[in-house]
Image (tube, coloured by chain):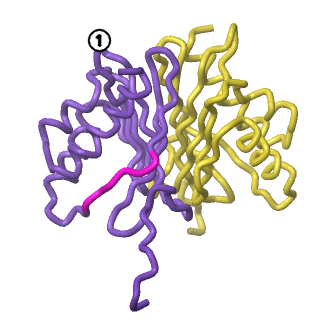
Chain colours: A yellow, B purple
Amino acid sequence: MSDTDAVLFANEAFYRAFADRDEKAMDDVWSFSEQIACLHPGWGPLFGREDVVSSWMAIIRNPDSPAIVCHDARAHVYGDTAYVICFEEIAGNYLVATNVFIREGRVWKMVHHQAGPTSAQPNTVRQEPAGFFN
Amino acid sequence: MSDTDAVLFANEAFYRAFADRDEKAMDDVWSFSEQIACLHPGWGPLFGREDVVSSWMAIIRNPDSPAIVCHDARAHVYGDTAYVICFEEIAGNYLVATNVFIREGRVWKMVHHQAGPTSAQPNTVRQEPAGFFN
């Protein structure tokens, strides 16, 4: 597996953990580096593993949290560090996200996430064809 | 100069170039890596040096673009890659930003920027002391 594929795999694991409400998988996604951070849309910055992972646990434990789908993930690898840019589809709206990963042994772990609003749409969203009645 | 200080210096150079409307300095900030990207608030992703730097030139050439001040910059260094989280003060409002840098020779160059809205405020914003008449 190329580094790019491995980073995209780690990125996918993050969105899969969110979608599946899988607390252990979400915990596994994040690095044990002391330098992790997270910028949830509209929030102030969170720093440190405890605050960052706790915020995600609160989100995935909340039954009212909407589903999430990742689109158009694109990985940029620089040696043992990488960042992914992707769209997040949440309740029919889109955000754009930056996810930063570092290589830890044989796997890539997330050290930072920022998501924010966008007026754009991903390329991979299927356009509904014009129907007979519309 | 420590790596952390050097990364914060590169981050400051980005905001200084913006504040000074300095096109050459803004061009110098960005890496010549083919993998650069930018997520302006509300925009779709921009990829590649030409599109990213052009977008910044359009912003700094526009006389209506507001002033910008960076607050609370915090650098996280991983070998030859680093990311900075900071607040951006723009026309009395605040954004939070992620700026990703890579080491190129003796300097750090920006490869990615994302900024988005936040409800938080930086710690370094000076609170006006209660005056005699208020």
Rendered position, A34 above or below B128: above
Drawn side of residue A52 relative to residue B48, left or right = right
Q: Is residue B17 magenta?
A: no
Residue A128 visible in the snapshot? no
Using the image as rendered, state which of residue A19 and residue A111 is in the foreground.
A111
Count of numbered tags: 1
Measuring from the top left, give residue A40's x and y in whole percent.
62, 51
Mark 1 residue crowding within 10 angstroms, few (<14) / some (14–19) / many (20+)? few
**x 64%, y 46%: residue:** A46
The answer, for residue B8, to whether it is visible in the render is yes
Is residue B127 shown above or below A90?
below
Residue B95 drawn at (x, y percent)? 45, 57
Judged left or right of residue B74, residue A88 is: right
Amino acid carrying mark 1 in the image: Gly
User: Quick one: quadrant of the C terminus of chain A?
Assistant: bottom right
Q: Nearer the viewer, residue B125 or A17?
A: B125
Label 1, on which residue?
Answer: B105
Instruction: Give how far across and how far down residue A4 sits, in percent.
Output: 55, 17
Q: Secondary structure at mark 1?
A: loop
Query: Residue at 56% of width from left, 30% of height from top?
Result: A100
Q: What residue is at 42 percent from the left and 55 percent from the top? A: B41
Looking at the image, which residue sits at the far front? B132
The reply, left or right, for residue A98 in relation to residue B27 is: right
What secondary structure is the stretch in magenta mostly built from? strand
Q: Residue at x 48, y 52 (%)?
A: B96
The percent coordinates of residue B119 (x first, y second) are: 56, 64
| Image: magenta residue range | B67-72
